[in-house]
Image: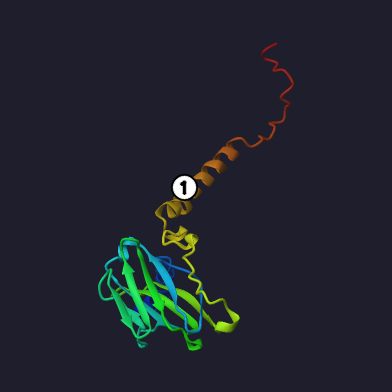
Amino acid sequence: MTLRVGAAWLPSALLLLQVLGSLSLSGPHTVTGTVGGSLSVQCRYEEKFTEYIKYWCKDSCSQLRKKIVETTRSEREVRRGRVSIRDDPANLTFTVTLDRLTEEDEGTYKCGIYIPLVVDPLFEVKVSVFPVTTWPSKTRHDTPDPSQHPRALLSDVHFLLLVFLKLPLLLSMLSAVLWVNRPQKSSGRRRDQPDHENQ
């Protein structure tokens, strides 16, 4: 019976790990390109992930699906067909490039980092491909949103200290000051009447 009760928290823990993992990876939310052109997606990661394998996959990225392309060593470009990936640990980024785009390339992709025995951090990117006649001939390369940097609020130690330690302490101190300075109930006599003992 203990095993069943203990297992009830497992889905919540896995979800928490997935959410925390996604904060470790960032990039553009959308990238656009034209049929026949190319586009690049740059994903940022935290320094602790420099030695891990980076990859690019489409849709759900389950373990059963094969990754489209993945790194083998840092700072080496790996190409599989029309897709290449290059890890740049000095800049804490890896870049995926799709060449000779087709309309079938449009969809939802994910940047990922393979970490053994842990839920992989993933970042979702929507790729849009437009026909040449309706879009300028230049391919637009989106850069990562600086606010989505791996040092996001929830992964920042100072933010966690602020929320879970400093803020409650400040609120407790403020409550104590307000409680001490609260108006006192009168004791039955008015304060503006002189004491009879002092007369």
For the N terminus, give its image quadrant: bottom left
Please tell me which residue is depicted at 74% across the width and 20% down the height of the picture: 193
Give the total number of marks visible in the rendering: 1
Counting other residues with Cα less than 10 Å from the Cα at mark 1, is it few (<14), some (14-19), or many (20 or more)?
some
For the C terminus, give its image quadrant: top right
Q: Nearer the viewer, residue 161 or 61?
A: 61
Q: Is residue 64 above or below residue 195?
A: below
In which quadrant of the rendered view does residue 98 lie?
Answer: bottom left
- Dot 1 corresponds to which residue? 166
Q: Amino acid at mark 1?
A: Lys
Residue 53 in the image: x percent, y percent?
A: 29, 73
Please tell me which residue is depicted at 29% across the width and 65% down the height of the picture: 50
Please tell me which residue is depicted at 47% across the width and 75% down the height of the picture: 125
Secondary structure at numbered mark 1: helix
Residue 10 visible somewhere in the drawing: no
Residue 84 visible somewhere in the drawing: yes
Residue 195 in the image: x percent, y percent?
A: 69, 18
Residue 175 in the image: x percent, y percent?
A: 56, 43
Q: Residue furthest top?
A: 199
Q: Nearer the viewer, residue 60 or 167?
A: 60
In which quadrant of the rendered view does residue 191 lie?
Answer: top right
Please tell me which residue is depicted at 48% across the width and 81% down the height of the picture: 108
Residue 70 in the image: x percent, y percent?
A: 32, 78
